[in-house]
Image (cartoon, rainbow, N blue to C red):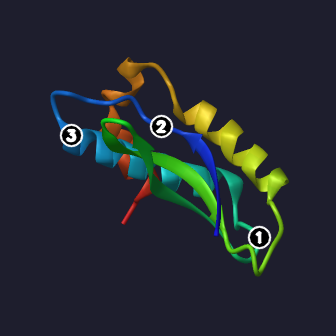
Amino acid sequence: MGREFIGECSPSDDDPEFEDRETEMAVKYIKQACGEPPPGVDVQVTSEDHELGSYPVVSVVWDDSICEYPDEYIGKCIEAFERFDLPEEVHERGEQIQKLLDPD
């Protein structure tokens, strides 16, 4: 299984659940912005190991037996994450963003 780091959302000491929600919103935004991934490829929250533990990050993952390194899709995902990774005052409106991504 291949994996390419796309980005991480800013950590929140005040509300760890906010960090999880923000990371999930980033994944939803990237999937919406980039469209259908190639077969065997997905955007997911994965764990990045660190000497003090692990933390959630956004990654493109793929099944090596189904496809080669999805460089074009990874590039699109990085660009989409950069658009998502906006200043903090925008993220204060997280509920509004979530409603746009999840209209149901």
Residue with the most extreme bottom position: 65
Q: Earlier in the sequence, mark 2 or mark 1?
A: 2
- Image coordinates of residue 57 in percent, x first then y, are 46, 45
Q: Nearer the viewer, residue 52 or 101?
A: 52
Q: Are marks 3 and 1 in contact (CB under 8 Å)?
A: no
Q: Are marks 2 and 1 in contact (CB under 8 Å)?
A: no
Q: Earlier in the sequence, mark 3 or mark 2?
A: 2
x and y percentages locating residue 25 in the rendered image: 42, 49
Amino acid under disc 1? Pro
Observer-nearest residue: 104 or 26?
26
Depth check, front residue: 58 or 22: 58
Q: Earlier in the sequence, mark 3 or mark 1?
A: 3
- Crowd rating for badge 2 (residues with CA inside 10 Å; few <14, some 14–19, many 20+): some
Tag count in the figure? 3
64 with respect to 104 (left or right): right
The residue lying at 40 percent from left, 52 percent from top is 24
The residue that mark 3 highlights is 16
> Would you name the residue on which mark 1 appears?
38
- The single residue placed furthest to the left in the displayed view is 14
Question: Which label number is shown at residue 8?
Answer: 2
Quick check: can you spot residue 95? no
Residue 69 figure quarter: bottom right
Query: Which quarter shows the C terminus?
Result: bottom left
Secondary structure beneath disc 3?
helix
Q: CA distance from mark 2 to mark 1?
A: 23 Å
Q: Name the element at disc 1.
A: loop
Taking the spot 51% from the left edge, 60% from the top edge, the residue there is 44
Dividing the picture into quadrants, the one containing residue 6 is top right
Secondary structure beneath label 2 = loop
